[in-house]
Image: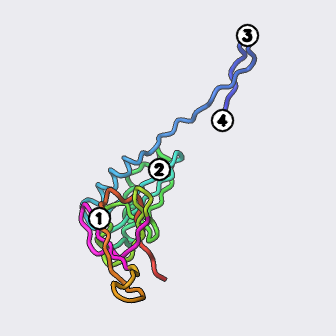
Amino acid sequence: MYRKIKKVEGKGDKKVPYFIAKKLITKDYILKLLNQHLGDGNVFVTGVRVSSSNEINVFLDGDTGVTIADCVAASRFLEKNLDSEKNDFSLDVSSHGATTPLVMPRQYTKHLGRDFQIKLNDDTKLEGKLLEFNANELKLEYSVKEDKPIGKGKVLVTKYHIIQYNQIKESKIKLKF
């Protein structure tokens, strides 16, 4: 949006940008409010996005899952603490999502025994069943066909990947339909 200003001798009309003063809501402020609301409970924040037009998207996960009631409670808490008289915003609070990559070590514990697709920092792709997980690493079990030690044919062999958490670029649950 531009507005005209007066003529300057020999320069003609000049246009200058016209900015509307608008208070932006920050991601850090939303995280602070959510941590205040959720505390050290079962539900935790896995992501927050705030656009330049104050469109706020919040993603929650929980040690035993997230309910609609959890999302509604977080949404109402944020709405109450974000003054809609001073800030024009839209708010969407939802669960992390089954197809969304895991982003925190805390998310792995409820998925023990499930199949994963993991992409490492060097773009190596691994698949397998999550057997163990701690703060530093996880253990995946996978099967591969190898030649028999004696004779012809192949035999199915179970192997394991030990992966350091800091080597993981992306980790998704492999859904079965």
How far apart in space, not on screen, are marks 3 and 2 (Cα)? Answer: 45 Å
Measure the C-alpha gap from mark 4 to mark 1: 46 Å
As drawn, is 139 to the left or to the right of 125? left
Q: How many marks?
A: 4
Which residue sits at x=32%, y=76%?
A: 159
Q: Secondary structure at mark 3?
A: loop
Mark 2 highlights which residue?
A: 50
User: Residue at 32% of width from left, 56% of height from top?
Assistant: 166
Check disc 1 and give the amino acid type.
Arg
| Residue located beneath label 3 in the image | 9
Q: CA distance from mark 4 to mark 2?
A: 23 Å
Q: Name the disc covering residue 1, or none.
A: 4
The crowding category of the residue bearing disc 3, from other C-alpha atoms within 10 Å (few below 14, some 14 to 19, many at least 20), is few
The span shown in magenta is 125-143
Q: Amino acid at mark 4?
A: Met
Q: Judge whether residue 64 can be spotted in this image.
A: no
Is 131 magenta? The answer is yes
**Which mark's residue is nearer the viewer, 1 or 3?**
1
Tell me the number on the disc at residue 85. none
Secondary element under disc 4, as helix, strand or loop, is: loop
Q: What is the CA distance from the residue labelled 1 to the residue labelled 2?
A: 24 Å
Image coords of residue 115 (percent x, y): 39, 76
Circle nearer the viewer, 1 or 2: 1
- From mark 3 to mark 4, how far is it between C-alphas? 24 Å
